[in-house]
Image (cartoon, grey):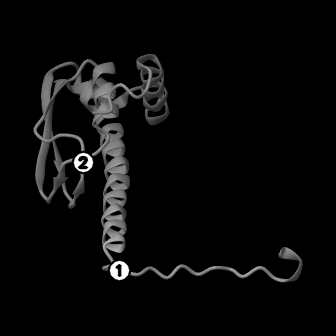
């Protein structure tokens, strides 16, 4: 849907920057768990619109992780919904986990609010709702 909006090299640079910001210079967790192959499941725990998949795909790609999505970008989901499964080396899963969840949470939150606003605007256009917007009246020289 929107995988081709950002230039691939720009997206790759963004992901590398995010990963560097999110982790310390020494990967303590990775040193403990090593390279054994593991899997984790991504769940949507709140109702909302799923968003951010293209960015998360770039994170997983950068860390050589394989993802299978069970839902798609823009789906409206109820809690608790299984969204996808990610497989790969345990140390890379740990590196990707927080960043991927932060991206999905933020993007999904924005998409959910935008969808609600679109619904309210549609209701307003159909004459079903009225919004009162406070307007500051200009004073004296502000005219």
Tally the marks.
Answer: 2
What is the C-alpha distance between the residues marked 1 and 2? 27 Å
Q: Quadrant of residue 110?
A: bottom left
Residue at the spot of label 1:
129
- Quadrant where the C terminus sits is bottom right
| Mark seen at residue 119 | none
Say left or right for 7 vs 123: right
Q: Quadrant of residue 112?
A: bottom left
Q: Residue at x 30, y 65 (%)?
A: 119
Helix, strand or loop status at disc 2 = loop
Percent coordinates x, y for residue 129 in the rendering: 35, 80
Percent coordinates x, y for residue 24 in the rendering: 46, 31
Q: Quadrant of residue 114?
A: bottom left
Q: Nearer the viewer, mark 1 or mark 2?
A: 1
Q: Nearer the viewer, residue 81 or 77?
A: 77
Sort mark 1 into few (<14), some (14-19) or many (20+) by Cα contacts within 10 Å. Answer: few
Residue at the spot of label 2:
50
Residue found at the far right of this picture: 141
Q: Residue at x 44, y 79 (%)?
A: 131
Sort mark 2 into few (<14), some (14-19) or many (20+) by Cα contacts within 10 Å. Answer: many
Proximity of marks 1 and 2: CB atoms separated by less than 8 Å = no
Q: Residue at x 21, y 18 (%)?
A: 35
Helix, strand or loop status at disc 1 = loop
- Quadrant where the N terminus sits is top left
Percent coordinates x, y for residue 93 in the rendering: 24, 30
Say left or right for 116 vs 41: right
Nearer-N-terminus badge (1/2): 2
């Amino acid at each position: 849907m929107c995988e081709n909006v950002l230039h691939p090299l720009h997206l790759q640079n963004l992901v590398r920057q995010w990963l560097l910001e999110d982790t310390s210079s020494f990967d303590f967790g990775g040193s403990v768990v090593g390279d054994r192959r593991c899997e984790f499941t991504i769940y949507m725990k709140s109702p909302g619109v799923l968003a951010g998949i293209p960015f998360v795909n770039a994170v997983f790609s950068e860390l050589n992780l394989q993802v299978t999505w069970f839902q798609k970008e823009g789906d409206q989901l109820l809690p608790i919904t299984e969204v996808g499964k990610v497989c790969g080396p345990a140390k890379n899963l740990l590196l990707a986990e927080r960043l991927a969840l932060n991206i999905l949470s933020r993007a999904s939150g924005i998409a959910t609010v935008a969808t609600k606003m679109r619904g309210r605007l549609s209701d307003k256009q159909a004459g079903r709702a009225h919004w009162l917007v406070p307007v500051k009246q200009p004073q004296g020289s502000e005219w």
